[in-house]
Amino acid sequence: MYLRTRGKNKIIEIEGVEFEEVHYGRDQSAFRIFGYHHGGEFILTRIDTNHKSHK
């Protein structure tokens, strides 16, 4: 529901395996979370409280 779709998602590599990093946030809100899906779980990679990245 809060998946942000604008822009390209970043590909991150962890222990030789590539994952697509996605970010979630609410419209008009500066707070966002970044992470990737693996094994049915969402793995959090960073929290952007003031919309400092991808600006």
Image (cartoon, rainbow, N blue to C red):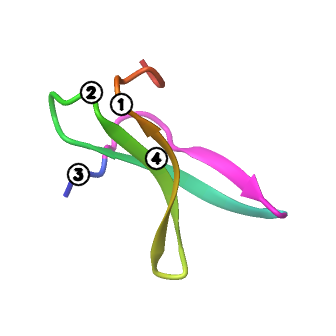
At numbered mark 1, what does the secondary structure look like: helix, strand or loop?
loop
CA distance for labels 3 and 2: 13 Å
Q: Are marks 3 and 1 in contact (CB under 8 Å)?
A: no
Using residue 53 as the reference point, say whether residue 27 is left or right of it: left
Residue range in magenta is: 4-15
At numbered mark 4, what does the secondary structure look like: helix, strand or loop?
strand
Q: Residue 2: which disc? A: 3
CA distance for labels 3 and 1: 15 Å
Q: Amino acid at mark 1?
A: Thr
* Front: mark 3 or 1: 1
Using residue 31 as the reference point, say whether residue 7 is left or right of it: right
Q: Nearer the viewer, residue 31 or 54?
A: 31
The residue that disc 4 covers is 34
Q: Earlier in the sequence, mark 3 or mark 1?
A: 3
Q: Residue 49: which disc? A: 1
Q: Residue 30: which disc? A: 2
Q: Earlier in the sequence, mark 1 or mark 2?
A: 2
Q: Residue at x 19, y 30 (%)?
A: 29
Position in image of residue 35 (x %, y %): 50, 54
Q: Residue 39: which disc? A: none
Q: Amino acid at mark 3?
A: Tyr
At numbered mark 2, what does the secondary structure look like: helix, strand or loop?
loop
- Where residue 10 sits, quadrant-wise, is top right
